[in-house]
Image (cartoon, helix red, strand yellow):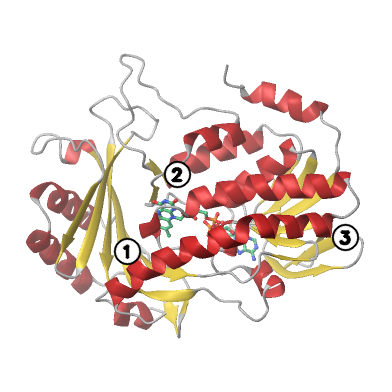
């Protein structure tokens, strides 16, 4: 039987509490790491710099459902009570995964999630590790885990000689549309479509509805368009400076002329289904441009500090593996911290985490760099 949230909480309640952790970042990796640490008997303070999460147009493919179910204690939501249909694909929206993790964290009495808390500095001594936020507060724990993404502040202390992820030389345009846009004119796609045309790639994917339903009528459809021709625009808008990705290009900041060019190119490059979905997103200005970064790690820990998720390693989304790697990080780091707090040395145990995860993280990013190099013509 699948563990229900309250069952998982009961198990977490009964477990002897071993110590404390501060997790920096409350997005997917932070939430997963918080849950894994709590289940292992560690009390968690999680600090997230934003006040709340906006709807993200991104979707995640290749999700390991069994691992995600284990970490959240709850199955994927399927409100389709009329038929046992299989999900539209293994792609799920970022928003759906985030909501599921967030609900599990909300139900966990051993995790304190604080929003609007921007970590600026990280420190440690022989007894503990701590962070300081921009408003001067200090949070201390047995360990600090950096789950703060591709521009990680914690990484600056863990790997001072190799702090920044590098721009991979291209942007991914992302959009999500409702089934109603395509229903009357096209057949609903059965699975992920991967298309190449000239210099560009397009991934198109059917998705469940916002409420998790997979019944026809209210589902969603998403696309990701790989484009290496607009790097000047990214630099002009400050999304990339030097070799470093600073931020995504929000819909409101995409020039009208670029939207018109994308609409014309979509009409030339992509088959009717995907053309219509993209044109709908452009018309609604529901498009975001994400410049892609890559980071091959040399290390994942420094004393009582450790990195997980995109703070630890950043592969191109073309690998479809960043999320699952983050899930594995969450489980492995929690096991290591628990073992260290049970035993004599949390520092030694964190080195075990690095030994377990470093090589696979490096080869995951490198395999993606081969794609990036050929796609964007970069020398890495
Ligand atoms: C366009 C795109 C498509 C992708 N598609 C796939 C896919 O198909 N399959 C797959 O497996 N993976 C995919 N990925 C990768 C996947 O989304 C990530 O690996 C995964 O979401 C883990 O991200 P994260 O939580 O580590 O980092 P992030 O999502 O970057 O979260 C970091 C969090 O830390 C917070 N933060 C940052 N600095 C601070 C600070 N100083 N103080 C406090 N908080 C801070 C941020 O606000 C943010 O909430 C994709 C990524 C992108 C960009």
For marks 2 and 3, the one nearer the N-term is 2
Select label 2 or label 3 by which is in front.
3
Q: Residue at x 36, y 42 (%)?
A: 91
Q: Residue at x 21, y 58 (%)?
A: 282
| x, y percent for residue 243 | 45, 82
Residue pointed to by mark 1: 172
Residue pointed to by mark 2: 95
Q: In front: 185, or 333? A: 333
For marks 2 and 1, the one nearer the N-term is 2
Q: Which mark is residue 128?
A: 3
| x, y percent for residue 17 | 85, 37
Q: Quadrant of the C terminus?
A: bottom left
Query: What is the distance, in whole Å, between disc 2 and disc 3 at their CAs?
Result: 34 Å
Query: What is the distance, in whole Å, between disc 2 and disc 1 at their CAs?
Result: 18 Å
Write down the quadrant of residue 104 in the picture.
top right
Q: In front: 334, or 355? A: 355
Q: Residue at x 87, y 55 (%)?
A: 345
């Amino acid at each position: 039987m699948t563990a229900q949230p309250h069952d998982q909480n009961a198990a977490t309640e009964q477990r002897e509490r071993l110590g404390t952790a501060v997790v920096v970042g409350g997005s997917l990796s932070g939430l997963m790491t918080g849950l894994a640490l709590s289940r292992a008997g560690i009390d968690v303070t999680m600090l997230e710099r934003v006040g709340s999460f906006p709807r993200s147009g991104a979707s995640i493919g290749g999700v390991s459902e069994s691992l995600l179910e284990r970490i959240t204690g709850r199955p994927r939501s399927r409100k389709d009570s009329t038929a046992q249909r299989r999900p539209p694909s293994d792609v799920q929206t970022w928003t759906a995964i985030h909501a599921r993790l967030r609900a599990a964290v909300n139900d966990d009495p051993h995790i304190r999630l604080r929003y609007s808390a921007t970590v600026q500095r990280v420190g440690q001594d022989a007894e503990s590790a701590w962070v300081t936020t921009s408003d001067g507060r200090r949070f201390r724990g047995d360990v600090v885990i950096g789950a703060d993404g591709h521009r990680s502040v914690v990484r600056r202390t863990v790997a001072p000689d190799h702090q920044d992820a590098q721009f991979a030389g291209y942007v991914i345009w992302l959009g999500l549309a409702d089934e109603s846009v395509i229903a009357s004119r096209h057949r609903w796609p059965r699975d992920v479509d991967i298309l190449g045309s000239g210099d560009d790639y397009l991934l198109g994917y059917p998705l469940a509805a916002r409420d998790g339903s997979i019944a026809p009528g209210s589902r969603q459809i998403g696309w990701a368009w790989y484009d290496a021709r607009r790097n000047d625009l990214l630099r002009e808008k400050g999304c990339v400076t030097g070799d470093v990705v600073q931020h995504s290009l929000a819909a409101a900041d995409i020039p009208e002329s670029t939207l018109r060019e994308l609409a014309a190119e979509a009409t030339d490059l992509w088959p009717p289904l995907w053309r219509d979905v993209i044109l709908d997103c452009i018309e609604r200005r529901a498009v975001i441009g994400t410049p892609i970064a890559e980071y091959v790690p040399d290390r994942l820990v420094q004393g009582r500090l450790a990195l997980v998720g995109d703070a630890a390693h950043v592969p191109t989304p073309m690998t479809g593996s960043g999320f699952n790697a983050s899930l594995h990080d969450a489980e492995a780091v929690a096991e290591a911290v628990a073992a260290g707090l049970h035993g004599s040395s949390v520092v030694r145990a964190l080195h075990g985490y690095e030994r377990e995860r470093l090589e696979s993280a490096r080869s995951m990013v490198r395999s993606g760099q081969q794609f990036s190099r050929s796609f964007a013509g970069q020398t890495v």
